[in-house]
Image (cartoon, helix red, strand yellow):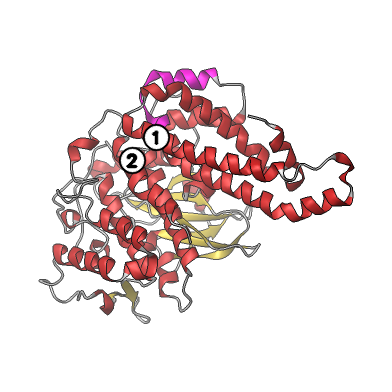
Amino acid sequence: MDHKWWLYAAPIGTPMYSLPKKTSLQLVFVRNIAQELDPDLREIQEETLSILVGRLRLALTRLEGLNVGENGGTRRKLKFAVGKSGLDNIIQDLSDWQARFDPSWLLLLRLGSPIIDVELRKNDLGSEETSSLTLFRKLAANKPMEGNERPHVSLPPSGLAGVQMQKIPRSTARFFQQPETGKWLIADNVLCYSKQHQQLVRENIRTLAQKLSCGDPDRSGLLRCRGFTPSSEQILAGLSSFELLFYAPQQSIMPPKSLRASLQAPSRHNLTQRIALARQFARAVSYVHALGFVHKNVRPETIVGFSQTDGTARRFFLVGFEQPRLADGQTMIRGDNEWHRNLYRHPTRQGLRPEETFVMQHDMYSLRVCLLEIGLWQSSVVYDGDSGIPMPNLSLGVSSNNPDKDSPLAVKARLVQLAEDRLPGLMGEVYSDIVLNCLTCLDEDNADFGDESEFVDEDGVLVGVRYIEKVLMKLDEIVV
């Protein structure tokens, strides 16, 4: 490929320079390990790379049109002035492609094949990019690390002394400002429900914090983790809890706003904003799974948005890791009878004693309930203004006082009906199909996710591959 087209973008800024460095490393990497990949994962890589080829060809065509000779004078300046918006679009197109490619790229780094490590060492030129990939590889694949490699995330309890925690309305999270640095942080409280599981919970939190400490919030939809610390709040007598601490995005306007509060606000997001939010949210769930975790608490209260000082659209991030667990780790099958939580749980995961162990598809079900609300831009739960008690939105057609009508299967059937009846006219057929597919993802007759035997693999990536194919890539196909 003729590399001179990168040079044409020099007057615009640096994004174009940083993109090919990472992309070229990834392309060489994928080429060298292609024969080791599962056919489904390889097919996704090929489809995603074909999109890149198309965008690069279009970029070359546009940029060649701006290749005016040095003696072009005023004509050359005018042509670049006119073409600047086109160059910005090229940069954005390639950045969007990188965001589309990243989820499947992270799944590659989880594969147990030793060729992954060989290729990382082969491409190791001492660069910060390669070092971060190697670190992520070890964290994502749960590989052993030297003491100096492992991110330090265990913080002393004294770090929260004197801190004034503030609630984020209609959210499980809180926020505060560090007195020493002035930085804003987001706090998630994680409770140990059983003394016998305290050590397990602590280890899960430590592993999650380490993995989230080296992430890219803009691409992942997950805030970068500062660490965790024992909490001084004893929610239940005799049981400990921990605070997971995350950095708020730079240039953010405080306070944050939860998705639940946004859904209840008088102003509505337009179609473009709703599609963008759906993509951010779906990508965040994908990243949680790529890290080898299940979230277990996906709902509008665990999604927080930050407005920016430059006036750009609010960016939303997934928080609310109340019971984080490794996807293949030990689980505590426990639940509650809170109807406003059960609304986002698959019928087999509701009640005090859920029928099934939590798996990634359960997060997908929760996500799709949220995507239904985003598509309708209507909250299924409303909070009483005086008491703050959650109440059902009557338009949902479910009364919290009617046990028979509130049965898990009846609620699910109502959600499916809403998606079938109202979403197509508001969001289009593709979006509606995505929501319906994941609302029924654990049904035996679901063609994409119903056969659990298709997702049994040593590295635990096959369900993530199908999620990328049937959810993320379908969302990316939507043109507004």
Residue 60 is marked as none
Q: Which residue is mark 1?
A: 107
Residue type at numbered disc 2: Gly
Residue 334, horizontal then vertical, whole percent: 19, 51
Cα separation, mark 1 vs mark 2, equals 7 Å
Image: 261 above or below 211 = below
Q: Which residues are magenta?
A: 108-122
Task: From the viewer's perspective, tell me whether residue 255 is left or right of residue 459.
Answer: right
Task: From the viewer's perspective, tell me whether residue 139 is left or right of residue 2.
Answer: left
Nearer to the camera, 413 or 55: 55
Q: Going from the N terminus, do you reach mark 1 or mark 2 first?
A: 1
Task: From the viewer's perspective, tell me whether residue 364 is left or right of residue 257.
Answer: left
Residue 219, horizontal then vertical, whole percent: 51, 46
Q: Which residue is mark 2?
A: 464
Of all residues shown, which one is farthest toward the left?
404
Task: From the viewer's perspective, tell me whether residue 265 is left or right of residue 383.
Answer: right
The overriding secondary structure of the stretch rendered in magenta is helix
User: Do labels 1 and 2 touch, CB within 8 Å?
Assistant: yes
